[in-house]
Image (spheres, grey):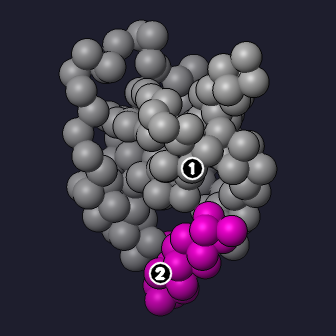
Amino acid sequence: METDKIQEDIIEEFAVFDEWLDRYDYLIELADGLPALDPKHRTEQYLIQGCQSRVWIDARYEDGRVWFTADSDAVITKGIIALLIRVVDGRTPREILDTELYFIDRIGLRENLSPTRSNGLLAMVKQMRLFAMAFASREEN
């Protein structure tokens, strides 16, 4: 599956860093590369509950695929959402729902986040899966 290739690439990219401070710096770099979220989506409706920082996620369904945009007011969180988008963006709803996001543990992300950031990570993943479920049910009807 293509998502596995992307996850393996992410694992390789993070493997070059011995220290977690360097990995955080890399997350900050990734945040800079995240395309801007349309200001109309920086509202309560798109805000993820359960995150310490403010995170907005939007998804659109086009030609059977889901496309995500997101933003955060915290750069590390923004880098994390950039990684998540990289793995699932442009996939079918079923592919998103079937993807095990194993890179999170393999790069040591979950164990090196504060409990509140870890909860936020789970909330972001949950929201992306909820979008995929909604679009999948739309396909079935």
Q: Nearer the viewer, residue 86 or 140?
A: 140
Residue at point 72%, 54% (across, down): 99
- Rendered view: 110 above or below 6: above
Q: Would you identify the image quadrant in which residue 119 lies?
A: top right
Can residue 16 be seen?
Answer: yes
Residue at point 25%, 16% (across, down): 40
The location of residue 92, given as percent across then percent down, is: 61, 45
Residue at point 47%, 89% (across, down): 16
- Rendered view: 76 above or below 42: below
- Rendered view: 40 above or below 133: above
The location of residue 125, given as percent across then percent down, is: 63, 40
Three-letter amino acid code of the residue under disc 1: Arg
**Circle nearer the viewer, 2 or 1:** 1
Asked if residue 14 lies in the magenta stretch, the reply is yes
Label drawn at residue 60: none
Residue at point 62%, 26% (across, down): 135
Task: Specify start and end residues of the magenta stretch as a single range.
Answer: 1-20
Q: Would you identify the image quadrant in which residue 54 lies?
A: top left
Q: Secondary structure at mark 1?
A: loop
Work out which quarter of the rendered image holds the N terminus and state it: bottom right
Q: How many marks?
A: 2
- Rendered view: 46 above or below 131: above
Main SS category, magenta section: helix
Three-letter amino acid code of the residue under disc 2: Glu
Residue underneath mark 1: 91
The location of residue 112, given as percent across then percent down, is: 61, 61
Label drawn at residue 13: 2
Asked if residue 37 lies in the magenta stretch, the reply is no
Work out which quarter of the rendered image holds the C terminus and state it: top right
Is residue 132 found left or right of 16 in the rendered image?
A: right
Q: Nearer the viewer, residue 21 or 82?
A: 82
